[in-house]
Amino acid sequence: MQQKTFIFTASEKLSNHPDFKLILEEFESYKKNSNDKEHPRPVNHIQRTTASVSYYFGRDRFDIKHKQARAEEIQHVHFREENSLWEFDDGDPKAQWDCKSNTYLIYSYFYHNNCHYYFLIDLIEKNAHNNDNAIYIASAPGYLAQAQEYKSNIINPPPPI
């Protein structure tokens, strides 16, 4: 059986976030512990019926409004906030799809040469859904450009200097 290979890279902006180490470690664990067929994310019917494999990450979905972003596999995954209610009163976890917050991590994904590549782009905190996702919508062209550049540098690396 072939070992799964993963590469996780983060944007400069996200790398400078005070909680970057936690975000990266938890995201790596979340993706590595997902089912083999759940890349870049668990399909909706799985998310609707099972709990997340991560304490920190909830609903995980692709961009449904921007065709180019969807083509580049730009996704966002909800990140647990202090007031998140992701468990029932008895302590059992809710289905991943029901684990939403107003903070989410933007990332892109592609598979190349038997490797899963994840590029962590941005964390929109505490107001991700305000004004009908205005922050994401305004930032989407930049996210797309970063994802395309990252992918291009992997698939067609620049010649050595």
Image (tube, rainbow, N blue to C red):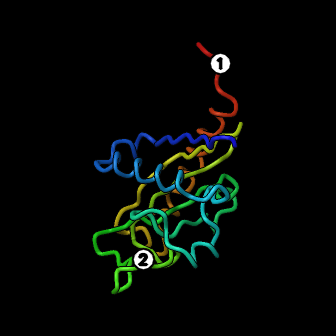
From the top left corner, tell me how far across and down residue 154 is, in percent.
64, 33
Q: Is mark 1 on a helix, strand or loop?
A: loop
Residue name at image x 47 percent, y 68 percent: 58
Q: Name the residue under label 2.
A: 93
From the top left corner, tell me how far across and down residue 102 is, in percent.
39, 71
Residue name at image x 50 percent, y 40 percent: 9
Q: In which quarter of the image is the N terminus?
A: top right
Q: Name the residue under label 1.
A: 159
Q: Quadrant of the C terminus?
A: top right
From the top left corner, tell me how far across and down residue 120 is, in percent.
49, 48
Asked if 19 appears above or below 81 in the picture, the reply is above
Residue name at image x 69 percent, y 30 percent: 156
Q: Which of 10 and 127 is in front in this view?
A: 10
**Callout 1–callout 2 Cβ contact below 8 Å:** no
| Amino acid beneath label 1 | Pro
Q: Is mark 2 on a helix, strand or loop?
A: loop
Residue name at image x 28 percent, y 70 percent: 82
Asked if 26 appears above or below 116 in the picture, the reply is below
**Which is in the foreground here, disc 1 or disc 2?**
2
- Closer to the N terminus: mark 1 or mark 2? 2
Q: How far apart are marks 1 and 2 (CA)?
A: 49 Å
**Picture quadrant of residue 90:** bottom left
| Amino acid beneath label 2 | Pro
Q: Residue furthest top?
A: 161
From the top left corner, tell me how far across and down residue 57 is, in percent.
44, 64
**Picture quadrant of residue 155:** top right
